[in-house]
Image (cartoon, helix red, strand yellow):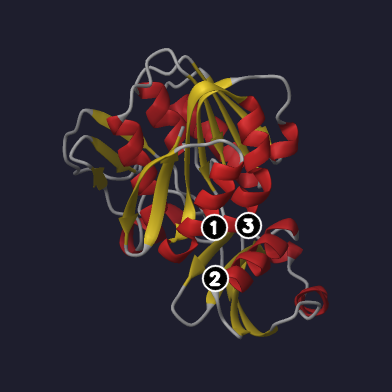
Amino acid sequence: MDYQKVTLSLTPDNQDFRDILMAELAEAGYESFVENENDIEAYITAPQYDAETLRNDINQNFFSISFKNELIPDQNWNKVWEENYFKPLVVANKCVVRAPFHKEFPNAEYEIVIEPKMAFGTGNHETTSLMMEYILESDMKNKTVLDMGCGTGILAMLASMKGAKKITAIDIDKWSYESTKENADNNNCYNIESRQGDASLLGNEKYDIIFANIHKNVLIEDMKTYQTVLNNGGLLFMSGFYEHDYKDITDKAKELGFKPNGYKTKNKWVAAMYQ
């Protein structure tokens, strides 16, 4: 499948505006994003790309955007990832994340195999690796787990490998929904249910542990829903925001009756734990 790579520059450029833009593009069918220092790269299948629609959509915001596009011909995406992006990753010396094409990789207590295809979620991002550290440190035995913003399903799979009883994995993107199903089967994690959608899918079910690795604004908006589906004494782990956003996240958590229980940082990204 051919892809269009659209490189977008924002004025002014800040994380909140980037989050808004990527959310809008995801709703328009863009499958994956790379955040660079000065721009964002967004990828969409070539048949879905419409420059005029994109121009009209992105100019409705209170920030200005310029963009350029480049056709990426169909190719061996595994080879592209192997050569340019995805190297075997070891988290906390306990879990190795690799792709099927990796022939050499370190041994570890847990091994997760991710089929990268044309998207992201391999554990290399700081927020994912921080959340994985929390899972490796926590008791998952016989727990019911909710993974919001599941991406490739990497957090859900690690929880399953650590003994979780049942995991629900939810993401708004169709690709993430399908990827989680595929990766879970490939890693023999048959107790993961993948759903496409957002927090509105949550009903009467209850969870012992919730992982939410999403953008700051979504976390604040959906935290009340997390509170209603979390068992008493349950744990809420949140990431996807920067150090300067920790106070806003924690203030909202306290308002809902959550008790802060520490946080981790890496390159100014944060993963925080609440009870």
Mark 1 or mark 2, which is nearer to you? 1
Is 258 in front, or is 4? 258
What residue do we see at 74% from left, 57% from top? 27
Q: Are marks 1 and 2 in contact (CB under 8 Å)?
A: no
Q: Relative to 77, is 96 above or below?
A: above
Which SS class for mark 2?
helix
What residue do we see at 66% from left, 44% from top? 222
**Mark 1 or mark 2, which has the lower sequence index?**
2
**Disc 2 to disc 3, C-alpha distance:** 11 Å
Which SS class for mark 3?
helix
What residue do we see at 48% from left, 82% from top? 38
Is 146 in front, or is 220? 220
Position in image of residue 173 (x %, y %): 66, 47
Residue on which the image places disc 3: 217
| Amino acid on which disc 1 is placed | Asp
Residue 273 visible within the image: yes
**Circle 1: is it few (<14), some (14-19), or many (20+) Cα within 10 Å?**
few
Is 108 in front, or is 215? 215
| Amino acid on which disc 2 is placed | Gln
Which SS class for mark 1?
helix
Residue on which the image places disc 1: 248
Residue 5 visible within the image: no
Label annotation for residue 15 = 2
Position in image of residue 256 (x %, y %): 61, 39
Label annotation for residue 157 = none
